[in-house]
Image (cartoon, grey):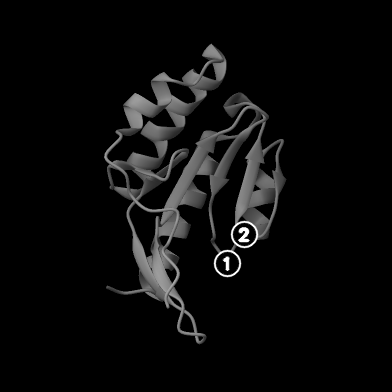
Amino acid sequence: MAREQKTRPTPTTAAEFIATVEDPKRRADAEAACALLAEATGEPPVMWGPSIVGFGAYHYRYASGHEGDAPLVGFSPRKANLVFYLYCDEGREDLLARLGKHKSGKGCVYVNRLSDVDPAVLKEMAVVTAEQMRARYPG
């Protein structure tokens, strides 16, 4: 039996979710990040699960048969930091080197404050990620 995907679009709006972020600086960063990613992707913000703001979507299918949907680009204003879901492959190291103060994992970039990074580079990463995901998962 197929497992139901936990992270999927919800009826909550991104604005409603962002308004619940307690820390006013984190909330302001989330509002700015939302606007930046919407502009970069040309997609409206959509809540994916209880805490991820996503932009656009793609459908994936693994060799194992597991499949699902995910946002092209996303972010979450967590208590400890802002988490950006940016999966760009080509040029990733160069973009990260120019980004500013951050930590990164395979598909995530962790930022304490939006002012710690160059918003133009963050936007470029979002554009590249969206382009690469659309090319990889045409739909």
Dots 2, 1 in contact, CB < 8 A:
yes
Secondary structure at numbered mark 1: loop
| Image: 59 above or below 15 | below
The circle drawn on residue 92 is 2
Say what amino acid the circle numbered 2 marks: Arg
x then y, percent, for residue 120: 50, 39
| Mark 1 Cα-neighbour bin, 10 Å: few <14, some 14–19, many ≥20 | some
| Image: 60 above or below 43 | below
x then y, percent, for residue 114: 58, 28
| Image: 86 above or below 59 | above
Residue at the image position 33 percent from the left and 49 percent from the top? 9
Q: Nearer the viewer, residue 6 or 63?
A: 6
Of all residues, the one furthest to the bottom in this rendering is 63
Residue at the image position 47 percent from the left and 58 percent from the top? 129
Which image quarter: residue 15? top left
The circle drawn on residue 89 is 1
Which image quarter: residue 105? bottom right
Looking at the image, residue 101 sits to the left or right of residue 37; the answer is right
The circle drawn on residue 49 is none
Q: Nearer the viewer, residue 25 or 117?
A: 25
| Image: 92 above or below 68 | above
Q: Nearer the viewer, residue 36 or 137?
A: 137
Which quarter of the rendered picture does the C terminus lie within?
Answer: bottom left
The residues tagged by marks 2 and 1 sit, at their Cα atoms, a distance apart of: 6 Å
